[in-house]
Image: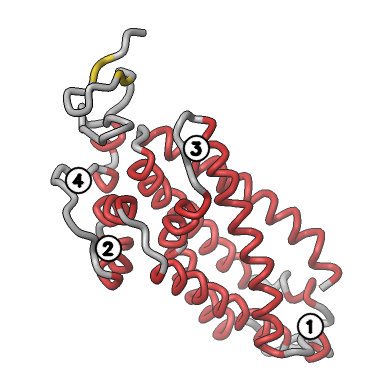
């Protein structure tokens, strides 16, 4: 297949590219942008980055514009806040759930801060694994991806996961039976967990869509390629997490 020359930077590009992989010159509107309007690429020139408040709100309201901005200049403060907030909510989960278990205090000898420290390590490892796999695939596709910048962009994509965790915590607090369970295994079999898992699934799919916008803009790749990468890796990580959960629960 013959290549085309970018009129902006003059490099040879594939006819399948919607934007130039080097300078970002826009050649055409992708089919994905027509089918899914929220994935439409901004047509204006980038000038200066949005504030932290605008980025956090924009991830939920105008994700294509927001991740276009984040991809141009990733920041550290927003990702750090989202990362720590997710950790805090997840830690509160385990502290609160242990109160429903016989001798639950023995499971959490160090209380909230002990759980927070342990989950920090596990959550960081899960993040590094998730975004590391994405980096490998991005590099394999011919773009030069870096784990650090993918991590920073990806934390904004985990904002729906934070919202789902907050909502799930409220649901568990309101609807989990006020009874004492023999162990964590029987606790996780309570019917309310179906709603919690549904929220987590929706949040992961939503986050994969958002991350595809950031990956697409940062590495100037086709929308379908970015979406295929994030969706496939997310599905893979979810399956691994389910297998780990099924293996680990009996020993909690």
Circle nearer the N terminus (2, 3): 2
* Residues at marks 3 and 4 touching, judged by CB atoms closer than 8 Å: no
Q: Residue at x 46, y 37 (%)?
A: 144
The x and y percentages for residue 7 are: 17, 23
Question: Is residue 116 found left or right of 108 in the rendered image?
Answer: left
Instruction: Give the spatial CA distance, label 1 vs label 3.
Output: 45 Å
Instruction: Give the spatial CA distance, label 2 vs label 1.
Output: 42 Å
Observer-nearest residue: 210 or 214?
214
Q: Nearer the viewer, mark 2 or mark 3?
A: 3
Circle nearer the N terminus (4, 2): 4
* Residues at marks 2 and 3 touching, judged by CB atoms closer than 8 Å: no
Q: Residue at x 60, y 56 (%)?
A: 128
Circle nearer the N terminus (1, 3): 3
Question: Residue at label 2?
Answer: 58
Circle nearer the N terminus (3, 4): 4
Residues packed near mark 2 inside 10 Å, few (<14), some (14 to 19) or many (20 plus): some
Q: Nearer the viewer, mark 1 or mark 3?
A: 3
Observer-nearest residue: 32 or 153?
153
Q: Quadrant of residue 110?
A: bottom right
Mark 1 falls on what kind of element? loop
| Viewport quadrant of the C terminus | bottom right
Mark 3 falls on what kind of element? helix
Q: Nearer the viewer, mark 3 or mark 4?
A: 3
Question: Residue at label 3?
Answer: 138
């Amino acid at each position: 297949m013959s290549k085309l020359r970018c009129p902006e930077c003059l490099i040879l590009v594939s006819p399948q590219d919607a934007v130039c992989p080097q300078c970002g010159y826009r050649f055409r509107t992708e089919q994905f942008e027509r089918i899914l309007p929220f994935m439409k690429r901004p047509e204006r020139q980038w000038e200066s980055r949005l504030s932290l408040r605008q980025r956090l709100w924009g991830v939920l309201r105008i994700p294509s514009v927001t991740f276009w901005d984040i991809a141009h200049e990733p920041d550290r403060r927003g990702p750090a806040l989202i990362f720590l907030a997710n950790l805090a909510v997840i830690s509160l989960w385990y502290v609160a759930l242990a109160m429903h278990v016989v001798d639950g205090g023995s499971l959490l000898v160090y209380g909230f801060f002990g759980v927070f420290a342990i989950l920090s390590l596990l959550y960081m490892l899960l993040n590094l694994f998730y975004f590391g796999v994405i980096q490998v695939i991005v590099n394999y596709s011919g773009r030069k991806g870096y784990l650090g910048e993918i991590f920073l962009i990806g934390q904004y994509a985990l904002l729906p996961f934070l919202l789902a965790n907050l909502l799930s915590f409220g649901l568990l607090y309101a609807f989990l039976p006020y009874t004492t369970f023999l162990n964590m295994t029987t606790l996780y079999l309570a019917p309310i967990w179906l709603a919690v898992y549904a929220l987590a699934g929706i949040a992961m799919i939503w986050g994969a869509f958002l991350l595809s916008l950031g990956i697409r803009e940062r590495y100037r790749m086709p929308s379908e390629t970015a979406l295929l990468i994030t969706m496939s890796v997310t599905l893979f990580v979810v399956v691994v997490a389910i297998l780990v959960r099924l293996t680990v629960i009996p020993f909690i």
